[in-house]
Amino acid sequence: MELDWLDQKMAEWKKYCDDRPFDKLKDRTDAKGRVVSKIEDQIKCIRDTQKDYAIIMEAVLQHREKEDVKKTKARGDATLTPLEERQI
């Protein structure tokens, strides 16, 4: 369940970064012409998002590997039923 939520968030972050290439960024201004977000700030935000994405992706992969090992230990090559996996 938690892995599904993390997968969804990772997809959102990936789309956020992909939709904002560095060479297309411009200073954002308000209605009065004041700069509210400089290019440098936007790039830092995107880079921070990419770092967080990489950290969470690694954690998710490690968690999935642990889950796979648990399933294998439980029955060898056989799969567990949803009840045994506590999904219901």
Image (cartoon, rainbow, N blue to C red):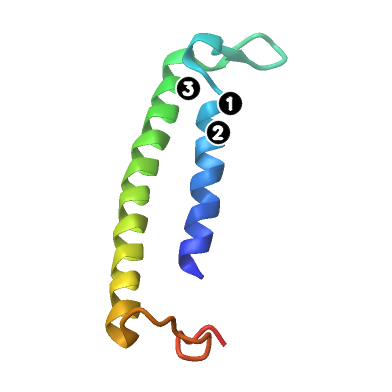
Q: In what element is the residue under mark 3? A: helix
Image quadrant occupied by the C terminus: bottom right
Type of amino acid at the residue the image marks with label 3: Gln
- Whole-angstrom CA distance, mark 1 to mark 3, is 12 Å
Vertical placement of residue 15 versus 25, above or below: below
Q: Do the residues labelled 2 and 3 touch (CB within 8 Å)?
A: no
Mark 2 highlights which residue? 16
Residue 63 placement, left or right of 16? left
Residue at 62 percent of width and 14 percent of height:
29
- Whole-angstrom CA distance, mark 2 to mark 1, is 5 Å
Mark 1 highlights which residue? 19
Residue at 53 percent of width and 83 percent of height:
87
Q: In what element is the residue under mark 1? A: loop
Mark 3 highlights which residue? 42
The quarter of the picture where residue 67 lies is: bottom left
Residue at 59 percent of width and 15 percent of height:
28
Q: Where is residue 21 in the image (x, y as percent from the top left)?
A: 51, 18
Q: Are marks 2 and 1 in contact (CB under 8 Å)?
A: yes
